[in-house]
Image (cartoon, grey):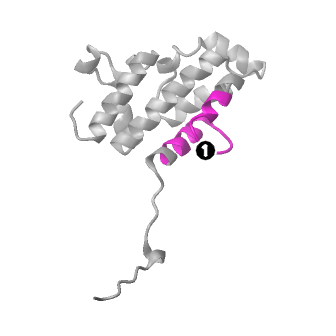
Amino acid sequence: MENVQFKFDSLEVRPSRASIFLKRLSAMLGLKTNLRNYSELIIITRAGISPLTIERLATQEGLVRSELDWIIPQRTLSHRRSNNEPLRQDETEKVIRLASVLASAEMTFGEQKLATKWLRQPNKVLNGMAPLEAAQTESGAKLVEKMMVQINEGYFA
């Protein structure tokens, strides 16, 4: 029997889907360091994030500001920004929910443009709502993410 030798220096180690997701989510939220695990989101949510994160989502993620009005009214956002106040916990949760859906969509469709196109299209599974609209509620966001898992696994959604 022959001895088989392996060259480990030639094996490519790919990051896990979760680590890629956390890195992308960290970038969307404007965090200085990448999230290492999902439990760190609890600390971030309680502390609140910068109001500038909403502008970052609008400008860098292919959204328009009006698509984010459900998170916080424009006047309140301006007040928080001018007073250098973080978003409240409930507002931060909404931003994290939206960023999570965006990051999942980008991973599912491979690029931002296709992701935002899918997120804006009405969908039968969502009773004619667009996934971006459905994601305004926690239960809607869960359903949208479930739909993306099905797409990743080869099911049509």
Of residue 157 and residue 69, the one placed in the foreground of this image is: 157
Of residue 63 and residue 70, the one placed in the foreground of this image is: 70
> Which residue is depicted at the point 58% across and 32% down?
56
Q: As drawn, is 52 to the left or to the right of 154? A: right
Residue that badge 1 annotates: 36
> Which residue is depicted at the point 45% across and 33% down?
102
- Does residue 53 sit above or below 8 in this rendering? above
Secondary structure found at label 1: loop
- In percent of width and height, residue 25 lies at 54, 38
Which span of residues is magenta-colored? 20-44
Q: As drawn, is 38 to the left or to the right of 7? A: right
- In percent of width and height, residue 138 lies at 46, 17
Q: Would you say residue 35 sits in the magenta stretch?
A: yes
- In percent of width and height, residue 79 lies at 72, 14
- Name the amino acid, label 1: Arg
- Quarter in which the C terminus is drawn: top left
Of residue 100 and residue 79, the one placed in the foreground of this image is: 100
- Quarter in which the N terminus is drawn: bottom left
Q: Image quarter for residue 26?
A: top right
Crowdedness near tag 1: few (<14), some (14–19) or many (≥20) residues, C-alpha within 10 Å: few
- Does residue 6 sit above or below 16 in this rendering? below
Residue 136 visible in image: no
